């Protein structure tokens, strides 16, 4: 079949790369894609939020399956539109995608159905929000209610910092409509991990776990970003904890959405933390994590198209995983996630080892040169027999790309150091 992937980042690149390997696929298209994907997919000059043009293209090119990568088209109802046109598409409707689109909705669902998460309150009033913080223990977490590209979360350790974050989100509308409401919640301590699953109604097919690194700088310092690197497997999280998370969080959430008349079909992403009381939810997303997808999908040995078709048909699926580890390090433009410059050269991409997995995000090709075209530029991933070997190879290779105009964290997968093998 012909497959269409909607999106333009690293998540969409790894999807195209993985789907291209399927014997069931004739052609892979990515709309709008990026220049780095051209070895595995054909770029289509259609914006990911242009539903009319995407529907037209899917019909004209006899697309057998469309897969939605990013969150914005989901919240804009791209799946609803394709379904109305009778076009096969993998992703949740806008009603189900609200689990990511509104943190207040997600928290209320968790409260109603006793899904473990941090205690919380939400506010539209600056004064009431500040008053609430003064009655809580610090640190505390302040979140924009809506979509903020992974940057709408602030962990505050002082009242002054809390006041500043509340003012920025509610008064100054730092994230536009996304921060007209804020959620203030308890700070949870423990080991974080990402657990994603293919879901259709109450049928849940868990993927293997990974760990993302959200903060911009080493040792989890600096502002939150869309993700600076990830790795899988996560050796310090036991299989028992993973199974507990599946049974106490993923399955009940899928069932809750069905009960609410918001049946979920697509990828349900749970950002989790292992606490003294067991795993709890930090956030839900309605799509594959980025950069988690870039380290999890390379470990998936099962044909992805066969898998997705099986999920859509609610068939029995057995996912097979490589025992090898993947470590992925994100190269970003200096200044990201705040103001950054574009158009600077990224050297030596062609000189990277053929053992490296390179997934492009904010890059463009100008003549023979690769240039920056965004905040997160690309991910250098290494798949090796052990986590330690993958870590060493990824860092040896990404060093070739370093200039004064970009940066990367040097501690991806370090949290598994005590159990690295």
Image (spheres, rainbow, N blue to C red):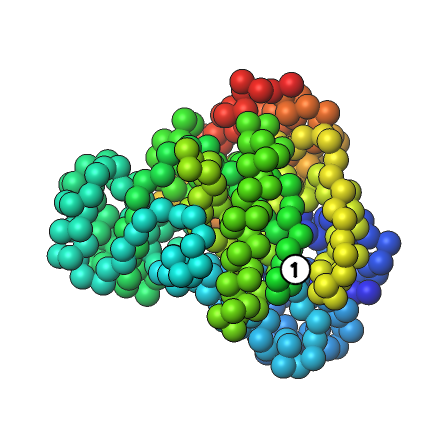
Residue 278 is at least partly visible in this image: yes
The relative height of residue 141 versus residue 191 in the rendered view (above or below) is below
The percent position of residue 125, horizontal first and vertical second, equals 18, 61
Asked which quadrant contains residue 322, the reply is top right
From the viewer's perspective, is residue 166 above or below residue 391? Answer: below
Q: Viewed as shown, does residue 296 lie left or right of 241?
A: right
Circle 1 residue: 203
**Residue with the most extreme bottom position:** 85
Left or right of residue 12: residue 144? left
Q: Position of residue 371 (x, y in %)?
A: 56, 43
Q: Residues within 10 Å of mark 1 (few under 14, many from 20)?
A: some
Observer-nearest residue: 35 or 62? 62
Number of disc labels: 1
Question: Is the residue 390 above or below the residue 336 in the image?
Answer: above
Residue nearest the observer in this picture, 172 or 67: 67
**Between 133 and 23, the one nearer to me in the picture:** 133
Image quadrant where one finds the C terminus = top right
- Residue positioned 55% across, 62% down in the render: 255
Q: What residue is at 49 percent from the left and 70 percent from the top?
A: 260
Percent coordinates x, y for residue 320 in the rendering: 76, 42
Q: Looking at the figure, which quarter contains the N terminus?
A: bottom right
Please, what secondary structure does the residue beneath circle 1 have?
strand
Give the farthest residue toward the right: 23
Near-viewer residue (309 or 343):
309
Q: Residue at x 72, y 63 (%)?
A: 314
Q: Residue at x 51, y 38 (%)?
A: 193
Report if residue 342 is visible in the image: no
Where residue 35 appears, as percent x and y from the top left, is: 64, 51
Quarter-wise, where is residue 419 in the image? top right
């Amino acid at each position: 079949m012909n497959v269409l992937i909607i999106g333009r980042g690293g998540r969409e690149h790894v999807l195209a790369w993985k789907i291209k390997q399927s014997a069931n696929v004739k052609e892979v298209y990515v709309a709008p894609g990026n220049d780095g994907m051209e070895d595995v997919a054909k770029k289509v000059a259609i914006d990911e939020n242009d539903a009319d043009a995407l529907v037209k293209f899917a019909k004209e090119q006899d697309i057998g399956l469309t897969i939605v990568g990013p969150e914005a088209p989901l919240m804009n109802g791209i799946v609803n539109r394709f379904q109305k046109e009778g076009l096969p598409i993998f992703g949740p409707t806008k009603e189900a995608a609200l689990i990511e689109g509104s943190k207040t909705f997600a928290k209320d669902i968790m409260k109603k159905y006793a899904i473990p998460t941090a205690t919380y309150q939400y506010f539209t009033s600056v004064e009431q929000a500040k008053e609430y913080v003064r009655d809580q223990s610090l640190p505390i977490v302040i979140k924009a209610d809506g979509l903020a590209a992974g940057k709408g979360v602030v962990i505050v350790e002082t009242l002054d910092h809390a006041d500043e974050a509340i003012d920025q989100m509610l008064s100054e509308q730092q994230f536009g409509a996304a921060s007209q409401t804020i959620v203030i919640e308890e700070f949870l301590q423990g080991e974080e991990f990402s657990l994603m699953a293919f879901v259709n109604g109450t049928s849940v097919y868990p993927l293997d776990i990974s760990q993302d690194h959200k903060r911009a700088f080493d040792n989890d310092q600096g502002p939150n970003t869309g993700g600076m690197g990830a790795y899988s497997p996560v050796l310090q999280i036991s299989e028992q904890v993973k199974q507990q998370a599946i049974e106490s969080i993923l399955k009940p959430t899928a069932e809750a959405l069905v009960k609410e008349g918001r049946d979920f079909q697509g990828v349900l992403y749970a950002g989790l933390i292992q606490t003294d009381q067991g795993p709890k939810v930090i956030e839900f997303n309605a799509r594959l994590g980025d950069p988690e997808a870039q380290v999890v999908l390379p470990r998936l040995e099962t044909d992805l198209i066969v898998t997705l078709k099986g999920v859509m048909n609610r068939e029995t699926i057995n996912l097979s995983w490589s025992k090898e580890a993947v470590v992925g390090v994100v190269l970003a433009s200096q200044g990201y996630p705040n103001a950054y410059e574009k158009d600077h050269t990224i050297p030596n991409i062609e000189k990277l080892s053929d053992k490296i997995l390179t997934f492009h995000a904010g890059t463009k090709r100008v003549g023979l040169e690769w240039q920056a075209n965004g905040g997160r530029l690309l991910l250098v991933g290494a798949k090796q027999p052990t986590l330690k070997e993958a870590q060493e190879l990824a860092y040896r290779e990404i060093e070739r790309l370093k200039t004064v105009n970009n940066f990367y964290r040097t501690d991806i997968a370090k949290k598994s150091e005590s159990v690295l093998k």
